[in-house]
Image (spheres, grey):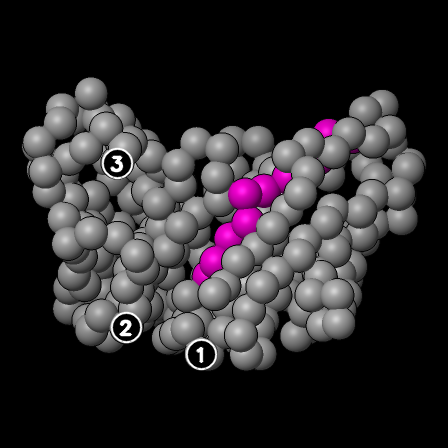
Amino acid sequence: AQRVTQPEKLLSVFKGAPVELKCNYSYSGSPELFWYVQYSRQRLQLLLRHISRESIKGFTADLNKGETSFHLKKPFAQEEDSAMYYCALSGREYGNKLVFGAGTILRVKS
Amino acid sequence: DAGVTQSPTHLIKTRGQHVTLRCSPISGHKSVSWYQQVLGQGPQFIFQYYEKEERGRGNFPDRFSARQFPNYSSELNVNALLLGDSALYLCASSLRAPSSYNEQFFGPGTRLTVL
């Protein structure tokens, strides 16, 4: 079964502190992992995907197949990073539909 | 381009009624997917259409149906509404059939309230 778990509903950090948003997954096959972000009053948008191995807005995420994790990290949080973050997975075995976690609210305090 | 558009923005219905939600994809996009987002949860996949054919269906009852038109716009229909159908319904479009290489672009959603 496909499942994405984001254990924290809310993560609150101070500006300049490191950020790690946790994501664990369960999947039979070869999953593709994504992070989506929703800023206040904006629509859901793709932040990054593991196949691109890119850094977007200073965020990175490494797929750890041994631990079935895809944690999102940023070394120095900024106030504009405050948003709702969703981890998601998809895979060819399941028709490439996106399966989302429940989301984590990130609050960056000044 | 305004991006993916959805109508209406908000909708209030009573139990047992029927509802139709509409989605217009980004110009040139041929794939549309529908998601239900209940308060406090992430989006849950309902349907996926590509080139007017159903390509995937999530774990939803037969009360939920959808279709894609020749212009690639899409409708989601829900019959015999239940209180539990109250949610934000999201539409997403992509250039080709969804895959890891084809980004899905989301619309603003339709907020459905069932009383």
Q: Quadrant of the C terminus of chain B?
A: top left
Q: Give the numbered dot on residue B48.
A: none
Residue A96 x %, y %: 44, 72
Q: Are marks 3 and 2 on the same chain?
A: yes
State the SS at label 2: strand
Q: Quadrant of the N terminus of chain B?
A: bottom left
Please report, as a chain letter, where disc 1 is located.
A
Whether label 3 touches label 2, CB < 8 Å: no
Residue span colored magenta: A98-108
| Residue drawn at (8%, 32%) of the image | B17
Q: Which residue is mark 2?
A: B55
Q: Is residue A13 magenta?
A: no
Q: Amino acid at mark 1?
A: Glu
Q: Position of residue B103 (x, y in %)?
A: 50, 66
Is residue B30 among what the camera can see? yes
Residue B85 badge: 3
Indicate whether A71 appears above or below A85: below
Look at label 2 and name its amino acid: Arg
- Name the dominant secondary structure of the magenta segment: strand
Identify residue for label 1.
A93
Label located before the other in sequence (3 or 2): 2
Q: Nearer the viewer, mark 3 or mark 2?
A: 3
Question: How far apart are the alpha carbons under marks 3 and 1?
Answer: 28 Å
Instruction: Tell whether A107 sits left or right of A85.
Output: right
| Circle 1 Cα neighbour tier, 10 Å, few/some/many (<14 / 14–19 / ≥20) | few
Query: Residue A102, position in %: x, y?
Result: 54, 43
- What secondary structure is marked by label 1? helix
Picture residue at 40% right of the left edge, 50% below the top: B44
The reply to whether discs 3 and 1 touch (Cβ–Cβ < 8 Å) is no
